[in-house]
Image (cartoon, grey):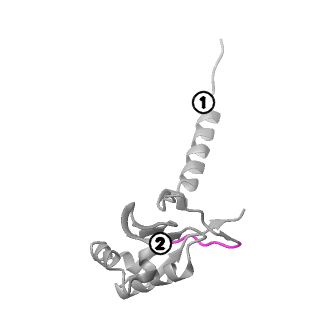
């Protein structure tokens, strides 16, 4: 007669579940990097708060996957009206915005987007970077 002890298997299953729960709260789950964006590399990173996400590719500004304005037009605009209208529809989430920008986007574009966010009441801007491991 052979007996099977399930205690060891249950212990390993519990450890595996805990490991998966701890590692499931990564930034990549709630900040999507898409539209051909390459993030700049950073030597130190902090985990940003969950908030509305803006993405700036080389050609377009996106708000949660919705195209808002062309990057070339942002440089010429005084204020980014489509962005202002989009931000008005968002919940404040403590005034945070996560900004995901391609590493080669001109700084003037990023500066204008940040200024528009701050004018719309979203004064806390998190800039997404690629952590260097």
Mark 1, residue position: 6
Q: Residues within 10 Å of mark 2 (few under 14, many from 20)?
A: some
Mark 2, residue position: 98
Q: Quadrant of residue 97?
A: bottom left
Horizontal side of residue 25 vs 15, given as left or right: left
Query: Which residue is more in the foreground, 98 or 106?
Result: 106
Secondary structure of the residue carrying numbered label 1: loop
Residue 102 placement (x, y as % from top left): 56, 67
Horizontal side of residue 61 vs 83, given as left or right: right
Whether residue 124 appears in magenta in the rendering, the answer is no
Secondary structure of the residue carrying numbered label 2: strand
User: Is disc 2 in contact with disc 1, using a CB cutoff of under 8 Å?
Assistant: no
Task: Name the chief secondary structure element in magenta.
Answer: loop
Q: Which contiguous range is marked in magenta?
A: 43-50
Task: Give the mark, 2 or 1, whose residue is nearer the N terminus.
Answer: 1
Residue 17 placement (x, y as % from top left): 55, 45
Residue at the far top in the pictured view: 1
The residue shown at (53%, 70%) is 101
Q: Residues within 10 Å of mark 1 (few under 14, many from 20)?
A: few
The residue shown at (52%, 67%) is 58
Q: Quadrant of residue 64?
A: bottom left
Residue 116 placement (x, y as % from top left): 39, 84
Whether residue 44 appears in magenta in the rendering, the answer is yes
Residue 55 image label: none
Residue 133 placement (x, y as % from top left): 72, 62
The residue shown at (53%, 52%) is 21
Query: Which residue is more in the foreground, 34 or 69?
Result: 69
Location of residue 124 with respect to 104 vertically, above or below:
below
Horizontal side of residue 117 vs 106, given as left or right: left
């Amino acid at each position: 007669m052979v007996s099977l002890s399930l205690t060891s298997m249950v212990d390993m299953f519990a450890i595996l579940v805990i490991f998966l729960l701890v590692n499931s709260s990564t930034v990549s789950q709630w900040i999507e990097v898409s539209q051909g964006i390459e993030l700049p590399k950073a030597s130190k990173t902090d985990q940003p708060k969950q908030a509305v996400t803006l993405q700036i590719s080389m050609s377009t500004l996106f708000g949660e996957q919705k195209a808002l304005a062309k990057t070339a037009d942002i440089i010429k605009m005084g204020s980014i009206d489509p962005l202002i209208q989009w931000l008005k529809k968002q919940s404040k989430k403590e005034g945070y915005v996560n900004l995901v920008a391609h590493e080669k986007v001109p700084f003037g574009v990023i500066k204008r987007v940040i200024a528009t966010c701050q004018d719309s009441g979203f004064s806390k801007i998190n800039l997404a970077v690629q952590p260097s491991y």
